[in-house]
Amino acid sequence: MGGRGLAATMVFGLLAGACASGGGILVPSSQPAGPAFTETVIQSGLIVPWEVAVAGDGRMFVTERPGTISVFESTAAMAKRTASAQVSGVRAMGEAGLLGLALDPDFSRNQLFYVCASRLDQGEWRNQVLRYRASANELTVDTTILRAGIVASGLHDVCRMRFGPDGKLWIATGDGGQPARAQDATSLNGKVLRINSDGTVPSDNPTLKGQSSPTAVYALGLRNPGGLTFQPTTGTCFVVDAGDQTQD
């Protein structure tokens, strides 16, 4: 019998033995224990809380999709709300609304943070990045650092933001339900963006095909990338993109 015939016979024998014993597919006798989780309600009464960020002083910042930014004095259960603000012009529909939030790397000194909001502006529905300043009991708009380029949509409207170890603001955006945008270098949808904290483009960003200079686009071809983080030791950026039915 040739090698292939022997291998096939051995595999068939193993499967037949497993089924004959009533055990179905063979599984290891022991499984590694997973991490233990404890469920605790930290805050209640929120409307579609989308992002949570905790400052070095312990304050917890939360965005709610209808447009509210809330600050709680700590992450303790039912901690006091110390400040809140309603982002103007937010159009919350489907997956759109007030989305990501990121604290400035120098937050302890400058008290600046950034939010991404789906807003009506100049007759267009756009996802915009606004910079806010926090005080003990007040949140005020500082400026808009990214006004145009990300089309808002009720579908695939993710806007996840993180500051990387390089001090740049990284933004993962959805394709807005239009897959062609993800491969369009002139669109900011379906991308990972990398910008300076003032909204300008870093000089070391890649120059994409068809472009003559670096743009805000760092990576393209994404559908609905709801996860964005950095490996603490290496600084490598990891992105989680939601598939159609599987392959998340």
Image (spheres, grey):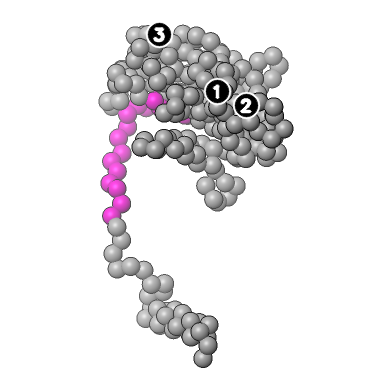
* Percent position of residue 15, x then y: 44, 79
Q: Give the range drawn in magenta.
A: 33-53
- Mark 1: give few (<14), some (14-19) or many (20+) Cα within 10 Å: some
Q: Label 2 to label 3, Cα distance in Å?
A: 37 Å
Read off the residue under disc 1.
202
Q: Do the residues labelled 1 and 3 touch (CB within 8 Å)?
A: no
Q: Callout 2: helix, strand or loop?
A: loop
Alpha carbon separation for disc pair 1 and 3: 31 Å
Percent x, y of residue 69: 45, 18
Locate residue 32, reporting x and y percent. Answer: 29, 57
Q: What residue type is disc 2 on?
A: Pro
Q: Is 109 situated above or below 183?
A: above
Q: Can residue 105 be seen in this view?
A: yes
Residue 186 occupies quadrant: top right
Residue 119, compared with residue 24, is above or below; it is above
Q: For label 3, count other residues whose C-alpha is less than 10 Å away and answer few (under 14), some (14-19) or many (20+).
A: few
Characterize the local packing of mark 2: few (<14), some (14-19) or many (20 or more) Cα atoms within 10 angstroms: some
- Residue placed most toward the observer, 146 or 215: 215
Residue ID for mark 2:
214
Does the magenta-highlighted stretch encompass residue 44? yes
Label 2–label 1 contact, CB within 8 A: yes
Residue type marked 1:
Pro
Spatial distance from mark 2 to mark 1, Cα to Cα? 8 Å
Q: Circle 1 sits in a helix, a strand or a loop, which is it?
A: loop
Q: Where is residue 144 in the image (x, y as percent from the top left)?
A: 56, 13
For label 3, the residue is 138
Vertical relation: 68 (above or below) 33: above
Residue name at image x 58 percent, y 50 percent: 245
Question: Is 38 left or right of 101, judged from the image as shown?
Answer: left
